[in-house]
């Protein structure tokens, strides 16, 4: 099993940047990803990275603005978010899974508690 703890959320103006972190403990050899859920909307996939860091995937609307990375020595996954927009406002969740397809479909068994990102216009 793995335990996930997110950090780095906050309030930022449109056009600003934030970096989210997800620290993993326990078993850590998982593909990792980020999801988000805005009020009144379903949770959606944002980004994912495989164990080695050689494969990434992104939601179309964040491509070119968000970058996922990982430091396996620190058991931490990051998501750098630049050029933030008000529509990026959501609770962001970290997830982990052994299988890539399970991860990006949001079917992971392991989730963090979430961190709030609010982008003001």
Image: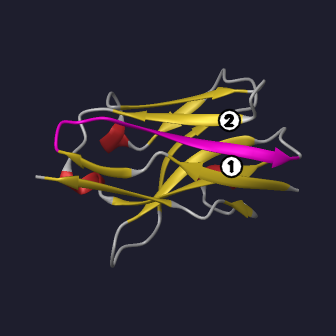
The magenta-colored residue range is 14-26
| Label 1 residue SS | helix
Q: Main SS of the magenta segment? A: strand
Q: Residues within 10 Å of mark 2 (few under 14, many from 20)?
A: some
**Mark whose residue sits in front, 2 or 1:** 2
Please, is residue 74 above or below residue 36 in the view?
A: above
The percent coordinates of residue 51 (x first, y second) are 75, 31
- For the point 72% across and 50% down, the residue is 96
Q: Residue at x 25, y 41 (%)?
A: 84
Q: Residue at x 53, y 49 (%)?
A: 7
Which quadrant would residue 105 be assigned to in this image? bottom right
Left or right of 67? Residue 76 is right
- Circle 1 Cα neighbour tier, 10 Å, few/some/many (<14 / 14–19 / ≥20): few
* Residue 120 sits in quarter: bottom left
Tag 1 residue: 101
* Residue 48 falls left or right of residue 44: right
**In the rendered image, is residue 98 in sight?**
no
Which labelled disc corresponds to residue 14?
Answer: none
> How was the colour assigned to the protein in this rendering?
secondary structure
Residue 90 among those drawn in magenta: no
Q: Which residue is mark 2?
A: 76
The picture places residue 98, in percent across and down from the top left corner, at 81, 47
Mark 2 or mark 1, which has the lower sequence index?
Answer: 2
| 108, above or below 29, in the image | below
């Amino acid at each position: 099993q793995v335990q996930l703890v997110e950090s780095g959320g906050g309030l930022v103006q449109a056009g600003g940047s934030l970096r989210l972190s997800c620290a993993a403990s326990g078993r850590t050899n998982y593909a990792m990803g980020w999801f988000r859920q805005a009020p009144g909307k379903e949770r959606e996939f944002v980004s994912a990275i495989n164990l080695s860091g050689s494969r990434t995937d992104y939601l179309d609307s964040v491509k070119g603005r968000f970058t996922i990375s990982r430091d396996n020595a620190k058991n931490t996954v990051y998501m750098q978010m630049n050029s933030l927009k008000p529509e990026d406002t959501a609770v962001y969740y970290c997830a982990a899974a052994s299988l890539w397809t399970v991860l990006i479909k949001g079917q992971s068994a392991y989730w963090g508690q979430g961190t709030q990102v609010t982008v003001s216009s």
